[in-house]
Image (tube, coloured by chain):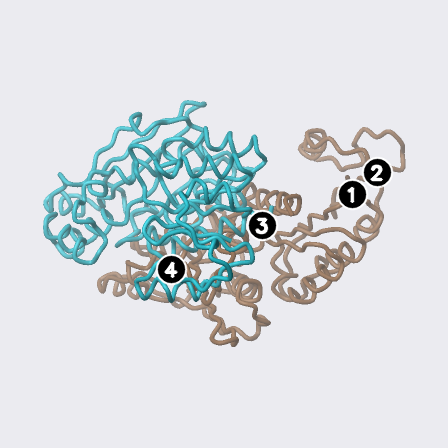
Chain colours: A brown, B cyan
Amino acid sequence: MAISDKLKGTLILPEGIDIPTVLDILGRGKGLAEYPKATPDQVESLDPLDMIERTDADIIAEMTYTDIKTAEPATSYIKKALRTGKHVVTSNKGPAALHYRDIQDLARKNGLQFRIEGAVMSGTPVFHLAESGLAGNAIREVKGILNGTTNFILTKMETEGMDYGPALALAQKLGYAEADPTADVEGFDALAKIVILSNVLLGGSLKTTDVPCKGISAITKADVEAAKAQGFRFKLIAHAKNDGGAVTATVSPQKLPLSDPLAGVMGAQNALSLETDLMGKITIQGAGAGKLETGFAILSDILAIHRR
Amino acid sequence: MAISDKLKGTLILPEGIDIPTVLDILGRGKGLAEYPKATPDQVESLDPLDMIERTDADIIAEMTYTDIKTAEPATSYIKKALRTGKHVVTSNKGPAALHYRDIQDLARKNGLQFRIEGAVMSGTPVFHLAESGLAGNAIREVKGILNGTTNFILTKMETEGMDYGPALALAQKLGYAEADPTADVEGFDALAKIVILSNVLLGGSLKTTDVPCKGISAITKADVEAAKAQGFRFKLIAHAKNDGGAVTATVSPQKLPLSDPLAGVMGAQNALSLETDLMGKITIQGAGAGKLETGFAILSDILAIHRR
């Protein structure tokens, strides 16, 4: 077993690592060098690429930050793992959004799995659902609320009559939105996710630059109220469809009728509707973010690897 | 391969049966004796129990009618299959509602699977979801809209201001409700399903007589309108929870706040919310009935057996 962290160092212990001990060390603000070790060479400041190559683990859980422009360093780590015989699970959107087909081909060629449950809707199991419960269906179209921050802002604008600015400020105060909210409110986070869903579930080969993307920053309280008066509700909708092999996607604010299963998704929740040939529309709703939820996504992919 | 039907007879052909030919024969109102056969003994009027014993199939798909009082003849067919080395998939609520633990024990003892995706919400994959996507979670509570007929009636009462009687008549006219609507409107169909969910997902050993059950026949247009004015919506809710090992369930009409994911489920749709320890609340919505959907449920369980 091994752990590598940019700030906390690297720890390799073939006989296993005691996780409560690690959490205790990290909780005290210390690095992995503090781990009580049998021999001195078991704590190292190896480059993660060397650690990935050197360990004899079966699975690498890649959980570095998302860089949606380069998908690095994650993509290099993932490819190194697959080239040296390790399955990969990740919660990182970058590699799946930019290089899904390449990485999946590399995994298949080596008889390994590349699993990404945590990259979209954290642990809400959209990929497991398509892979097991809906196996045998052709998925023709997906439509979802894939960004919790913008859904929280739109919910506050409608249910509490807030303007966009104060609703965004509240989202930032509660930790839903970052100091620079651009990636959320301009739709770029949802864009990366719909590209992943298009390529994984609909067999597309979309790039992020192929997808028209509009966020919610131009939506006013008056727009929300006018929609409500007509029986509609504004949602930031990520949509993709396979039209006879041609896969296209968009991200844009849309007025949904209240009868749409996505219209009832309130607050920071996420949801995805899948249009299938045999089962019609199936919708799954759950958390779209969170530490525990992302940790569960990683666990669920590790369990899936062991089940195969 | 073999087919046995009470009215259409029995057909056993070890080399396989051509399904389009069978559908053509049945479409012309004929019986399985019409199937073009190589030798005369391949069409028989065997008792289904003998057919199940005699065939060397790997899987029996049990699809007789549901008798919720006796769970027969389905339970006898299922036990015969498991005792003679065949996996079982079924869309029948009876055996799972009345004898789940017994049948599951028999399956395990013989190294076989007993799968019931079609028994609750037809092919909307609640059991697959719990088994794969949510594996690793403890499910503490489930809450669902499990009967499409009553949800259709309540939707019409709210959105079109209909009284209960005319809404029921419309449901009957459209084929959602049967001539004797008791099983739907008094909650007995939802009751059988929540007993199954309790015993499969929460580890309970409930009997149908353990579950307080109230239907929607006493709900008036005035009740629905008063709830709506307060920002609530009436739904027939099947609910079960595991409280430190004690599993209890109820079926009753409830006023849900519009923020509840189940409140947005309209028309003949079904939905189930699962409360989990790691992922919080996960809700899945989809069709609750239908020929194609039930057929898909059977297919999805057959695929699951092949994946293991």
Whether discs 1 and 4 lie on one chain: the answer is yes
Q: Closest to the observer: B43 or A304?
A: B43
Three-letter amino acid code at disc 2? Val
**Could you say whether the residue bearing mark 4 is in a helix, strand or loop?**
helix
**Could you say whether the residue bearing mark 2 is in a helix, strand or loop?**
strand
Determine crowd level at label 3: few under 14, some 14-19, many 20+ residues with C-alpha closer than 10 A. Answer: few
Q: Is residue A240 left or right of residue A38?
A: left
Residue marked by disc 4: A164
Q: Is residue A2 left or right of residue A212?
A: right
Whether discs 2 and 3 lie on one chain: the answer is no
Residue B254: percent from the left, percent from the top? 24, 38
| Mark positioned earlier in the residue sequence (1 or 4) | 1
Three-letter amino acid code at disc 3? His
Residue B59: percent from the left, percent from the top? 52, 46
Residue marked by disc 2: A43
Q: Is residue A139 visible?
A: yes
User: Marks 3 and 1: CB-CB under 8 Å?
Assistant: no
Residue marked by disc 1: A9
User: Marks 2 and 1: CB-CB under 8 Å?
Assistant: yes
Q: Closest to the observer: A18 or B196?
A: B196
**Could you say whether the residue bearing mark 3 is in a helix, strand or loop?**
helix
User: Marks 1 and 4: CB-CB under 8 Å?
Assistant: no
Residue A147: percent from the left, percent from the top? 47, 57
Determine crowd level at label 4: few under 14, some 14-19, many 20+ residues with C-alpha closer than 10 A. Answer: some
Three-letter amino acid code at disc 1? Gly
User: Marks 2 and 3: CB-CB under 8 Å?
Assistant: no
Q: Nearer the viewer, mark 4 or mark 2?
A: 2
